Amino acid sequence: MEELLIYDDTKNKIVDGTLYLVTTPIGNMADITYRAVKVLQEVTFVAAEDTRNTRKLLRYLGISKEVSSYHEHNKFSSGSEIVERLSKGQTCALVTDAGTPAISDPGEDLVRLCVKNNIQVTAVPGVSAVVTAVSLSALDTRRFVFEGFLPVQRSERKERLNAIKNEARTIVIYESPHKLIKTLEDLLRELGDRKISLCRELTKINEEIMRTTIKEACDYYTEHEPRGEYVLVIEGTATDENEDAFWKAMSVTEHINHYRDNGMNKKDAVKLVAQERGVPKSSVYNEYEKNNEGKHVAVFENLILRSDD
């Protein structure tokens, strides 16, 4: 039996003029990947959201490397400098304080700038707070939407919550401890009471997963001070509403034919079925056409037989 190759150094060479998006641990240092360590060791320099935190990580890994600052307040000037250095053949590892850079993070602007200037960008993936929280939530994990941090400004926040209150997918939100109670109150008022998992200090010693309802979470944190960074995983609104839907036991084809038998054309039937099931129109159309392919062939062959007669 061929030996399992865990790490192939020949396939992970650092390429000149490349920006590496390096995912760092969200709490447990042991979650750093072999590839992330190699990239941090071999790039020309590291661009970091907080240079102090990144230097601590590099010291932990035994790496001595130039670290430059790249964050929300200097992203335009620093981004231009990084692109200039990359265009000369240097290599850069972009890191955030924890997790994946460019996700709900100013790194997204640097990625766009690099792409605009034909600079190669690649990712060094690792642990994700979003995926970790969803997997631990005990809620529906088949489909979820990530909203990042909610807007601070009241009207913008209300608009965002109004946009997601009818969201059928599981909803994921980041929140800091000092804003948690206000956010839970806003969620209860705008979305109504529903299941929620509050994931605190993920992968750290004090990791805690509270699986409850929004109302119960409000009551709990009225009595207990929130501590640590939170990922909120919230039940989608359509989960219970569709349980008794008339089409629940139907296949996609049966669902479409139900509307066609009632006089609706195929295009409109496909659109309505996709909307009710919360899936793309293309997948509904493709499945319908696939299931009707045999019927089309049979009709065609029957026409041929009739013409021979």
Image (tube, helix red, strand yellow):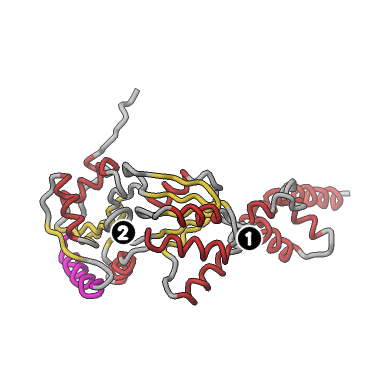
Residue 165 occupies which quadrant of the picture?
A: bottom right
Residue underneath mark 1 = 281
**Does the magenta portion include 187?**
no
Q: Residue 221 occupies which quadrant of the picture?
A: bottom left
In this view of the protein, which residue sits in the foreground, 294 or 181?
A: 181
Q: Is residue 72 above or below residue 43?
A: below
Q: Is residue 289 visible?
A: no
SS for dot 2: loop
Q: Which residue is mark 2?
A: 101
Q: CA distance from mark 1 to mark 2?
A: 32 Å
Q: Which residues are magenta?
A: 74-91
Residue type of the residue flagged with mark 1:
Lys
Q: Which mark is residue 84?
A: none
The amino acid beneath tag 2 is Pro
Does the magenta-highlighted stretch encompass residue 76? yes
- For image coordinates 51% across by 66% down, the residue present is 186
Q: Position of residue 306 (x, y in %)?
A: 86, 50
Q: Which residue is painted at 47% across and 56% down in the image?
A: 172
Q: Position of residue 38 (x, y in %)?
A: 20, 46
Tell me the SS state at disc 1: helix
Q: Residue visible at 12% across and 54% down? A: 65
Please state the horizontal and vertical placement of residue 229, each as a whole percent of the image. Answer: 36, 55
